[in-house]
Image (cartoon, rainbow, N blue to C red):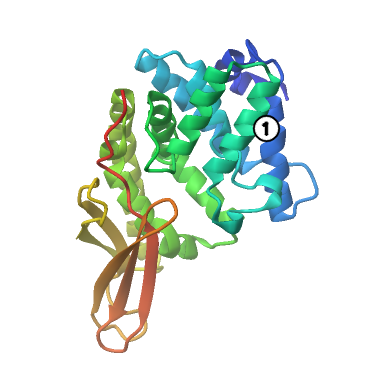
Amino acid sequence: MKAQIKQRTDFARIVEARAPDLVERVRAEIESGERSFDGRARKGESYLWEHTVHVASLGLRLALADKRPPLLPVLAALFHDAGKFAAGRYHEDDLAEEETAALLAERFLKVEDFSDKEVGAVTSALRALYDEQARKTWISDIVHDADFLAKFGALGAAQFFVKSTLRGRSLRQAVGHSLSKELTYAAALPANMRTAAGKRLARGKSRDSLAFFLGLLKEMKEAGGVDLVIRRLRVQPADAGLEAVEVRLAVPRVCPACGGPGAVTFSTDPGLKCEKLEAIWACRACGENATYGFCLPEISRRPSR
């Protein structure tokens, strides 16, 4: 326990100066929902809390680097995933998790006697993370950047495999299911940032992540595993506020069933929180196919200042 307290001291002490028990209360809420969802009865490490700590720490770092007061972005980061498994459910009734997170933040912060202005700033930032009609704020910019930065670099790559393991996927399945998204987002990471400090951090994380995943593909091929090649697509989202995105798909070099050549087709479709890409790789000879689907990076949203 002492090691955990020391690990979270930097961001936690800022929160605890105003609300001594708030960090632990949020932690308990997140861990309870996660355990209820995945059916674990015993106590143990929480992936979602570990990610929350990472995002809150990055939020503090970005706020200080951009000379912003850190309390409100740290609070928003602390709650940003609190609605993911609320009451042991996941995206029930198509309710965005950030909306649930905003409601939780409002309830928790009011009990701790934060002002209406402070509560409103945090909840507005949380809602702006998913609602494109909501006004972006400097707080939502920081949490947006911190959340994406946490998913890349060496630690981000490690968490990718932790998440895949939690979902019961082998290495081959993880690569086939999610690597195209990871490559696309890693390449777009600097352009996806909304803060100056975020852009500076993103350049290194983007480079390191791409190098790692490309090296992984090379070694998997040499080990007699999957043989994938990167196909680059230029995709124009239907949203006029977004620029074209370079999508990087990790697809079979040749058909694994017959050795024939393949081709990629794709379409996009607006969803609850994003514009979703669906790409299909299909063998021209035998019809063997694979489908890839994920949200497109939003690389041209203007930050709010």
Image quarter hosting the N terminus: top right
Q: Residue at x 44, y 31 (%)?
A: 143
- The image shows residue 300 at horizontal and vertical percentages of 25, 41
Determine the secondary structure under disc 1. Answer: helix
Taking depth in this image into account, of 41 and 164 the one nearest to the observer is 41
- The image shows residue 93 at horizontal and vertical percentages of 59, 58
Q: Residue at x 42, y 43 (%)?
A: 131
Which residue is farthest right?
41
Q: Is residue 35 above or below residue 227?
A: above
Q: Residue at x 28, y 69 (%)?
A: 266
Query: Which residue type does callout 1 highlight?
Result: Arg
Visible in this render: residue 4? no
Q: Which residue is mark 1?
A: 27
Which residue is farthest bottom?
286
The total of numbered circles placed on residues is 1
- The image shows residue 263 at horizontal and vertical percentages of 23, 75
Q: Is residue 35 above or below residue 110?
A: below
Q: Is residue 54 above or below residue 98?
A: above
Q: Is residue 86 left or right of residue 227?
A: right
Visible in this render: residue 160? yes
